[in-house]
Image (cartoon, rainbow, N blue to C red):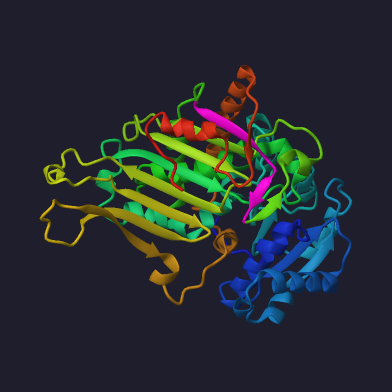
């Protein structure tokens, strides 16, 4: 059933995600007149406050996290907001919440960001209050469980009230402009697709590097670790977009069908194909930072860094390694995909003293959104002492290529799609479960091998074993 919701219910409305991302995104959409004037936004959380206090809370968040030039009509946006306190663990408050939400016959979108243990009682409460009808859709923010079993429990609980066509599992990386541009790069340009295979590509690197440490996520992160926090969702989604076959159409089912085929083709990771690490005290940007155990206040075997050599065992990618790397307290904040092409089969310039480098495509996702393709070009000159070739980058910086366009928060696109009911950039249940199955097997392998994280100094690129993981194959990490 297709509908555009006229009500949006935000769980966790006083939390960090709401302050930094959700409220600024919705205000920006309001300023650009992209959401219907009748859309009402209801916030809920445990914190006791009334509508006026919530609006003041939202105003402070917008002034802190949304650029001034994007706050047009902020007063009008704040007037959309209302608030209802709720203890999600008991049924008592849900009827009052439903009354605050009002009629849902035109459409209600629910954004649920909660601890995994609260999914089931929250769904029961929403059902109890009648907030689960055919005109209600549910958006789920991670973490969706801690392994395949707990993920299935959450998905089963949600499915009891909201069928798959009304369930939207969010991965905010899919809302980033450059991630969406990856599909345009591959499928709107004839030059790439004939080369996008094992015959022409040597390897692929995907890096998600963070300079921050725990940043108030102590309890969650120590239970999760880098593998479950970053690889299971963001990185495997990026891998699937790189490796997927051309879908028949730019439509939710077609795109997600192709992604899940890739995830199911992932070869189980073998011994010696992963490296884990945990940061120790060091320096980031010239500032001293503590080690993980110091921040945590106790010893822990949780990994803050992981590198993986992955393989997609299908016709297109057989024999092409995908190197995945993510970690905290690394030298710079960067998310990028590197597609390394093979060398030309024969250099006609070798007899003239020229050296060749293979082409490389670098897709920058954050902090800068850009695409760089390195090509070989001749250095100007009369060539009396031989021909010299040099790599020349072709750069497409998204802000420069599309002057006048706002650099949008990823959640803007995803919240608008949720309100309007477009599932293309959301993750389907079978994708999530294929991701968990692969990740759970990695963790089981670590347990069987008695593998514990190697230490690395904050400000470095992780344990030296991660460098060796790639260098054994003659590969150097792109930095």
Identify which residue, 79 or 164, lies in the foreground. 79
The answer to if 274 sits in the magenta stretch is: yes
Residue 290 position, x and y percent, is: 73, 46
Give the quadrant of the N terminus: bottom right
Identify which residue, 267 or 212, lies in the foreground. 212
- Determine if residue 104 is in view: no
Residue 302 position, x and y percent, is: 69, 34
- Residue at image position (71%, 67%) is 41
Residue 310 position, x and y percent, is: 46, 32
Residue 93 is left or right of residue 471, and the answer is: right
Where 422 falls versus 314 (above or below)?
A: below
The answer to if 80 sits in the magenta stretch is: no
- Residue at image position (64%, 19%) is 450
**Residue placed farthest to the top in the image?**
448
- Determine if residue 444 is in view: yes
Q: How many callouts does the rendering have? A: 0
- Residue at image position (75%, 74%) is 59
Magenta-colored segment: predominant secondary structure: strand
Residue 275 position, x and y percent, is: 55, 30
Magenta residues, start to end:
273-285
- The image quadrant of residue 293 is top right
- The image quadrant of residue 346 is top left
Where 327 falls versus 109 (above or below)?
A: above
Identify which residue, 158 or 360, lies in the foreground. 360
Identify which residue, 278 or 365, lies in the foreground. 278
- Residue at image position (16%, 45%) is 353
């Amino acid at each position: 059933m297709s509908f555009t919701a006229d009500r949006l219910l935000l769980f966790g409305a006083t939390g960090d995600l709401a302050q930094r991302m959700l409220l600024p995104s919705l205000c920006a959409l309001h300023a650009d007149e992209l959401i219907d004037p009748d859309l009402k936004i209801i916030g809920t959380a445990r914190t006791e406050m009334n509508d006026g206090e919530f609006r003041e809370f939202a105003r402070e968040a917008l002034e802190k996290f949304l650029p001034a030039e994007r706050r047009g009509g902020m007063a009008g946006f704040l007037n959309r907001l209302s608030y209802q306190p709720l203890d999600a663990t008991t049924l008592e408050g849900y009827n009052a919440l439903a009354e605050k939400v009002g009629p849902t016959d035109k459409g209600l979108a629910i954004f649920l960001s909660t601890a995994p243990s609260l999914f089931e009682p929250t769904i029961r409460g929403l059902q109890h209050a009648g907030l689960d009808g055919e005109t209600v859709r549910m958006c789920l923010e991670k973490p969706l469980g801690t392994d395949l079993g707990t993920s299935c429990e959450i998905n089963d609980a949600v499915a009891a009230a909201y069928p798959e066509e009304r369930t939207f599992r969010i991965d905010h990386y899919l809302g980033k402009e450059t991630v969406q541009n990856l599909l345009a790069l591959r499928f709107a340009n004839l030059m790439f697709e004939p080369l996008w295979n094992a015959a022409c590509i040597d390897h692929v690197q995907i890096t998600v590097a963070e300079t921050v440490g725990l940043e108030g996520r102590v309890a969650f992160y120590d239970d999760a670790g880098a593998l479950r926090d970053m690889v299971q969702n963001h990185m495997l989604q990026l891998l699937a977009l790189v490796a997927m076959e051309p879908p028949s159409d730019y439509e939710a089912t077609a795109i997600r069908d192709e992604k899940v085929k890739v995830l199911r083709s992932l070869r189980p990771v073998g011994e010696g194909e992963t490296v884990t690490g945990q940061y120790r005290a060091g320096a980031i940007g010239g500032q001293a930072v503590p080690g993980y155990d110091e921040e945590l206040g106790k010893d822990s075997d949780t990994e803050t860094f992981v590198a993986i050599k992955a393989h997609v065992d299908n016709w297109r990618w057989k024999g092409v390694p995908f190197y995945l790397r993510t970690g905290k307290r690394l030298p710079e904040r960067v998310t990028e995909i590197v597609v390394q092409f093979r060398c030309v089969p024969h250099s006609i310039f070798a007899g003239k003293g020229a050296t060749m480098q293979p082409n490389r495509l670098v897709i920058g996702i954050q902090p800068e959104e850009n695409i760089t393709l390195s090509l070989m070009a001749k250095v100007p000159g009369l060539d009396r002492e031989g021909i010299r070739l040099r790599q020349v980058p072709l750069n497409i910086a998204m802000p420069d290529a599309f002057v006048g366009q706002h650099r949008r928060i990823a959640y803007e696109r995803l919240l608008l799609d949720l309100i309007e009911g477009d599932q293309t950039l959301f993750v389907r249940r079978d994708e999530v479960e294929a991701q968990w199955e692969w990740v759970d097997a990695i963790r089981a392998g670590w347990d069987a091998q008695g593998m514990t994280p190697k230490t690395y100094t904050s400000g470095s690129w992780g344990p030296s074993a991660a460098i060796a993981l790639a260098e054994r194959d003659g590969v150097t990490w792109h930095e």
